[in-house]
Image (cartoon, rainbow, N blue to C red):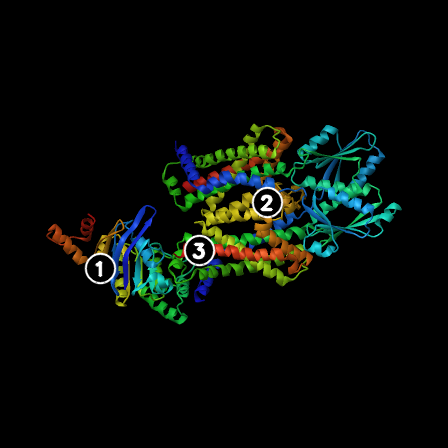
Amino acid sequence: MKIKGIIKKEFLHIIRDERTLYISFILPILLLIIFGYAIRTDLRNINIGIIDYDDKYLTKKIIEEIKKEEIFSKVERTYEFYEDLKSRKYKGVLIFPEGFTRKFEKKEYAEIELILDASDNQMAENIEGYIRQKIIGGNKNLQINILFNPEMKSTYFIVPGIIAIIFMVISAILTSITLTKEFENNSIEIYKVSKIKGYELYIGKIIPYIIIGYIQLTLVLLLGKILFNIPLKGNLFLLYFLSLFFLFTGFGIGITISTIFKEGRSTLMAVWLSTLMPSIFLSGFLFPIENMPVFLQLLTYLVPARYFLYILRGILLKGLGFKDFFPEFIALLIFSLFLIAVSSIRIKKEIG
Amino acid sequence: MIEVKSISKSFGKIEAVKDLSFEIKRGEIFGFLGPNGAGKTTTIKILLGILRPDKGEIFFEGENILKNIEEYRKRIGYVSQEVSLYKDLNIFENAEFRAGIYGVKKEKFLENYKILLEKFGLKLWEKEIIKNLPTGIERKASLLCALIHNPEILFLDEPTSGMDPLSRFKFFNELIKELKEKGKTILITTHYMEEAEYFERILLIHNGEKKALDTPENLKEVVKREKKLEKLPDMEEVFMEMIK
Amino acid sequence: MNGIKAIIKKEFIEIIRDKRNFYMVTIAPFILLLLFGYIISLDLKKVETGYFCENENKEIREFIYSLTASGFFINKGFFEKERLIEEIKRGNLKMGIIFGKKNREILFLIDGSQGLSAQKILGYISKFSQNIKKGNIEIKPVYLFNPSLETKNYTVPGVFVIIVIIISSILTGISFTIEKERKTIEIFNISPLKPHQVIIGKITPYTVLTFIDGILIFSFAKIFFKIPFKGNPFLLILIFFFYILIGLGIGMLASLISKTQRESMLGTFLIIFPFILLSGIFFPIESMSEFFRFFTNYFNPVTHFLICLRSILLKGANIKEIYFSFIFLIIYSFFIFTISYILILKKLKL
């Protein structure tokens, strides 16, 4: 069988080239560890300065309360807030004005000033929230329940994102690399002179990467379960099945681009820009789609990773079933069929 | 002019050059013959000072070349097997760049460039970017660039590989001859045995070892005598005899 | 001196003749700037909220009214209890509120699976809940350095820092590997040039190029996104120079250990990707685990340039206030060039 010959050759390339091996197996683990352990969105290790002009029992009590808050690693007295904030010694400084306790006891408005380094505005707002809650106290009537991810672990929504990214690397980047290599080394001639058909070359080229993709999917899911205890609520067979369509969009893009440029550097650039970057930034992986301006929101409809990520998170975290993401599935299906068609035509043209 | 004293070089377990000694005299055309993988390119690289030999030394006018490598390099020129020119630059820009890195003064460069351009018949192609040039022209251009700093010795590594017979004939009978008349010392490596006729002296190497070093006539004479042949053998036969 | 000049001239001609370089320094950075400037600098605007209650009353209507009035939430109306949860599950609603029977117990349901939204929604709720609570201690926040709390002031400098390191490292990496790929490296090998002349000659054009490019991109970002500039421009330019050198150094290192342009590009990405990811642009450094915090503070040049940039732009910091990051960048650039020098010495000469 001709296809078998290509598959075998392709596997030999993969095994002999350390870099492909690295991308295939070390990269997923590395991504998982970096994202899982390094990227945390919950606040920690914040340093706070305190200037207490009042210095009474009440201010001392409040300061003690703040010290108990876990997100603050240092709560210490200071004298000068401006310089300290400028040199990043503290993220915020609390100032108790003179007469604070007296006002409080008289039931007048007692004001505390909170000076924040707002050059990182998100953090400033978060710190403000924490301090308000600690000093003024939350409203006991309000109860908050966070669904699907009660502890708000970032790993829960990051692991599905990593799967999407890795799939794009495997399907688009690796296939485009093997294909441009054939163009650069002129080994594409071998296919031209042999009686091989376009679809045979196509299938032979992608099967090894489908296999690698599935191995990686399993690897990431397993590690996610072991290291971060990611819930796997839905049907895993469904997940494996639908992954195939996403992989195909990647193959389609990778193959089409390499037949256009036929040269390593431009191909790699174009594939990066058209697959990896949108998968990271326009898929809802890290940045919520509904926050984007309208034209970017419209652009996200053209990013297959958007649909795939929705399906992934739905199956893994929410236990959604097939009918819940039927529209997303249809979108993915259309993308993969379209891209398979385009790339097969290009391949056919190349090898005549 | 150049004296090579028992150099050896191995890469891992492979001994590329084994205890090689010879001398190149000023103004001669020195041929360096051997099949592919005989150790020709390794020897050239050692002569250029790119590779350091495991053993042995090379002297240029009595001084070890490693002692003042920059000065030595200014006096040699080199054309490698692959054409090493910048594909996005034209001939003039390539030459200007080469003159620059050898510290050739501007006027000196322009004067030399004009002469060389005329001699190689490249006037028509002067402003053309290298990647648009035919291979033959490209080779000539790279020879031009190697000569731009007016070196005393020229190392040519397989300059004729891929040339058709007519070009090869012209190459030796016109270019090389003319360079010799200018007083240049030329070292040429080749694996075409029939080119031996153009050299004044030949070093035959095989598997990194010196097999013979003499003029082509003497080598043939020796083989004729030894094998008791009726007429002079050709270089191919000489070589086969020598490596026995 | 002559030799260096010749290399510089040659590099410039090559840069101009290769169209891909042109795109790399002109169109690409501006698109990236606009795209990422927008994507990561947006605040969560509208939280679609649905409600469930057993019997609607005035109190509940008032609560909903004040909630929508706070500007963070969009009223999507009342739903059946199951339906409400279903809609959150499908992602049509970002939040659901269930009103309890008598004592006004209110349950907020937030979708925790979608990126960073949940955290922000929580913040909004806590802000909102302060408003409806009556007490006599009041906290008066003062937002120094960015009084209107504009996210773009924080993120656009970050995007700029990323673009600069990508351009400087990749362009340099390519220029070195192209010599290897096309065998022109031999010209240097046999030339009388010393290694430092080769490095200076090859690096200078890219320093100039990325320097000018960086200033153009920066000016564009400053004008387009209206970023404040409080500090000393000369100090910033000086630090920017060292940052570019680091980018060039990384590109040079990656190319020294690779054979083809593709390899050097992949290598460069593999080096700078963790730097960018862990720089504090996307996620707070304070929240990283011990190991990564250490890595970021002592090995990551992107972090330190970002600190300098933000401090100078937004805080008007002087050299004393950012001395650690400043010294770090200088030492780092020397360090990376020393390594490259040693590697080039090994490869180029004997």
For label 1, the SS is: strand
* Quadrant for the N terminus of chain A in the image: top left
Disc 3 versus disc 2: nearer the observer: 2
Kind of residue at badge 2? Phe
Disc 1 versus disc 3: nearer the observer: 3
In this figure, which residue is indicated by the disc labeled 2? C292
Q: Is residue B185 visible?
A: yes
Rounded to the nearest angstrom, the CA distance separating label 1 from label 3 is: 38 Å
Q: Quadrant of residue A139?
A: top right
Q: Where residue C178 appears, x then y in whole percent? A: 44, 53
**Residue located 19% across and 57% down the image:** B216
Q: Is residue A325 visible?
A: no
Q: Which mark is residue B186?
A: none
Q: Which mark is residue C344?
A: 3
**Crowd around label 1: few <14 · some 14–19 · many ≥20 (10 Å):** many
In this figure, which residue is indicated by the disc labeled 1? B201
**Residue located 62% across and 61% down the image:** C235
Kind of residue at badge 3? Ile
B15 over B1 or under it: above or below? above
Q: Where residue B150 appears, x then y in whole percent? A: 34, 66
Q: Where residue A284 appears, x then y in whole percent? A: 62, 41
Q: What chain is tagged by disc 3?
A: C
Between residues A342 and B70, which one lies in front from this camera angle? B70
